[in-house]
């Protein structure tokens, strides 16, 4: 099973761990760091991204039209929890790097969220507007009590991620955990 030792720490009354499962009790949490590089001196400053001090996040992304630009204010990532410990990704997160405010969408019980892919909205050309003008796409794998699962593609609005999916496409086949993706305009 994917969950490993997480069953023991969660207090679940059934065994889901195998010898191949990750032991989340021994995996350090993933914290989003913000690096500031002074272009003249070359000095680098590292600090936790504002609003992320208690979060366990992974696979951060920004709107591809704003990568490496000063105007980039939003980061999107998968989120495991808000209690400073490692765990499987259970939802998606938007972080405002100016204010530290976050928006979260939790996928639901026994649903694991893969790395998100950001797709700029048609009216977002990167020249004007804000970098939250994007769609957040993510693969979600849901498991039921029998261990069987269903996969879906969720589409979240980057401007209001907390509202949940604007669309969900259920797939005929279960996608294995660990699938990564990317967006290519062509």
Image (tube, helix red, strand yellow):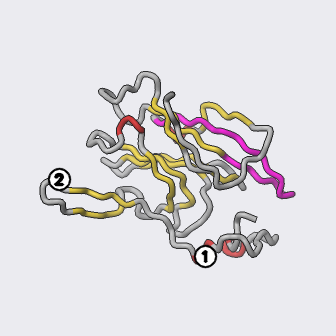
Quarter that holds the N terminus: bottom right
Residue placed most toward the observer, 6 or 82: 6
The residue tagged 2 is 39
Residue appearing at x 49%, y 50% in the figure? 77
How far apart marks 2 and 1 lie (CA) works out to 40 Å
Could you say whether the residue bearing mark 2 is in a helix, strand or loop?
loop
Residue appearing at x 73%, y 44% in the figure? 151
Quarter where residue 46 is shown:
bottom left
Residue placed most toward the observer, 152 or 12: 152
Q: How many marks?
A: 2
65 part of magenta stretch: no
Residue 177 percent across, percent down from the top left: 68, 54
Residue 42 vs residue 69: left or right?
left
Q: Residue furthest left?
A: 40
Could you say whether the residue bearing mark 1 is in a helix, strand or loop?
helix
Label whose residue precedes the other's in the sequence (2 or 1): 1
Q: Which residues are magenta?
A: 140-158
Residue 149 percent across, percent down from the top left: 79, 50
* Rendered position, 178 above or below 24: above
Principal SS element in the magenta part? strand
Q: Residue furthest front?
A: 186
Residue 151 vs residue 80: left or right?
right
Residue appearing at x 49%, y 34% in the figure? 119
Q: Residue furthest top?
A: 123
Using the image, tell me which numbered label, if any, was put on residue 25. Answer: 1
Residue 146 percent across, percent down from the top left: 86, 57
Report the mark closest to the observer, 2 or 1: 2
* Rendered position, 185 above or below 97: above
């Amino acid at each position: 099973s994917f969950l490993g030792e997480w069953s023991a720490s969660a207090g679940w009354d059934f065994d889901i761990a195998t010898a191949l499962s990750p032991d989340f009790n021994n995996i350090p949490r993933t914290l989003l760091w913000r690096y500031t590089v002074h272009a003249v001196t070359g000095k680098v400053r590292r600090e936790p991204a504002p609003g992320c001090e208690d979060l366990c996040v992974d696979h951060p992304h920004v709107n591809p039209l704003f990568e490496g630009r000063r105007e980039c204010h939003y980061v999107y990532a998968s989120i495991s929890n808000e209690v400073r410990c490692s765990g499987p990704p259970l939802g998606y997160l938007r972080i405002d790097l100016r204010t530290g405010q976050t928006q979260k969408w939790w996928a639901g019980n026994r649903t694991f969220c893969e790395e998100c892919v950001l797709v700029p909205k048609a009216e977002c050309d990167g020249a004007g507007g804000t970098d939250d003008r994007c769609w957040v796409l993510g693969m979600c794998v849901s498991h039921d009590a029998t261990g069987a699962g269903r996969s879906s593609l969720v589409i979240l609005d980057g401007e209001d991620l907390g509202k949940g999916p604007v669309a969900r496409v259920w797939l005929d086949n279960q996608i294995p955990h660990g699938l990564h993706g990317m967006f290519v305009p062509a």
